[in-house]
Image: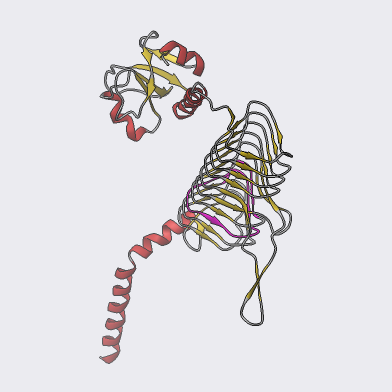
Amino acid sequence: MEFTAKQISDFLSGEIEGDPGLKVNTISKIEEAQPGSLTFLANPAYAQFIYNTGASIVLVNKDFKPEKPLNNTLIRVDNAYQALARLLELYQQNMPQKKGISSMASIADSVKMGDDLYVGEFVVIGENVVIEDQVKIYPQCHIADNVIIKTGSTLYPGVRIYENCIIGKNCTIHSGAVIGADGFGFAPQSDNNYMKVAQIGNVILEDNVEIGANTTIDRATMGSTIIRKGVKLDNLIQVAHNVTIGENTVIAAQSGIAGSSKVGKNCMIGGQVGISGHISVGDDVKIAAQSGLSSNIKDGKIIMGSPAFDHDKYIKAYIHFRNFEKLIKRIDDLEKELKDLKDK
């Protein structure tokens, strides 16, 4: 599909500098773009590439000031990265959409199915499942008994949804994710063995949640493990039983949240973060990658380290840590001088 600079600008409510009739048919990275493509500049670290990029049209922030002449048509917008996200969404919506129910899917007679669905090959759907309108279930997914999948959600190949779980509207669950497996509950016995504690709860994903590939969310022992609306989880994340993650929180890959912990809304959590069980993380908290939390965190904190503590204090402490060998040598030298003085 081709779009003119004017069509793109009108869609984004932008301002054109250059040829409004210039056409593009693809989107590229700024350092690799060729003529006929659109790119964007949001991060100042990439500003060097705008002067020799081959892109025909470049999205830039309204406050961008070029240091030398440009050969591209610019579209100035309030936020170039957000504008690109809107364009990518439009591009995806115009791609051919999967529809229809494969004859090779296994669907129980008691399933209630909405309109405009896609169910791929070798999908298995259990008893009393409810699938609302415009849901897409790609091949080899397994949907256990009594699951509800609400309007507009997409399950990519190989997703497993255990019994009684609820998937909200417009959720996206990527390949290999497991929603509702047993929580890690075992009671120690006097003979040093462990008795399994039955996990009889479920998982609830509220609306507009995205779950990355091979991420696992355990069902609650009792009640529900809850992922609130707008949460985005990256690939390879473990969410344990009875955890609650607040709305619009984002978590990067390989992080893990232990059982019964609560994470607030609007949090940003880096990769490989570990959160201990039964603790509470407040709203608007930012946690640096590879941090380890073992105690409650108040609203609005920025923390890092393991065990994690205040970001500013960590940076100051790290300066001393990097000089630790020198500090030890200074102490050793001072002790030697003190001993020499005592001996004299």
In terms of depth relative to the viewer, which is nearer, 52 or 157? 157
Q: Which residues are magenta?
A: 243-267
Task: Using the image, determine if residue 111 lies above or below residue 258.
Answer: above
Task: Using the image, determine if residue 268 lies above or below residue 58.
Answer: below
Query: Where, by quadrant of the figure, is residue 49 drawn?
Result: top left
Q: Residue furthest front?
A: 103
> Where is residue 253 shown, x and y percent of the image?
47, 49
Query: Where, by quadrant of the figure, is residue 80 drawn?
Result: top left
> Where is residue 202 shown, x and y percent of the image?
69, 51
Query: Where, by quadrant of the figure, is residue 142 drawn?
Result: top right
Q: In the drawing, does residue 126 fall left or right of residue 28?
A: right
Q: In the drawing, does residue 327 fall left or right of residue 92?
A: left
In terms of depth relative to the viewer, which is nearer, 289 or 235? 235
Q: Residue at x 56, y 63 (%)?
A: 294
Answer whether residue 259 is magenta in the image.
Answer: yes
Q: How is the image coloured?
A: secondary structure
Task: Using the image, determine if residue 289 lies above or below residue 24.
Answer: below
In terms of depth relative to the viewer, which is nearer, 163 or 238? 163
> Where is residue 227 shown, x and y percent of the image?
64, 46
Quadrant of the drawing holding the N terminus: top left
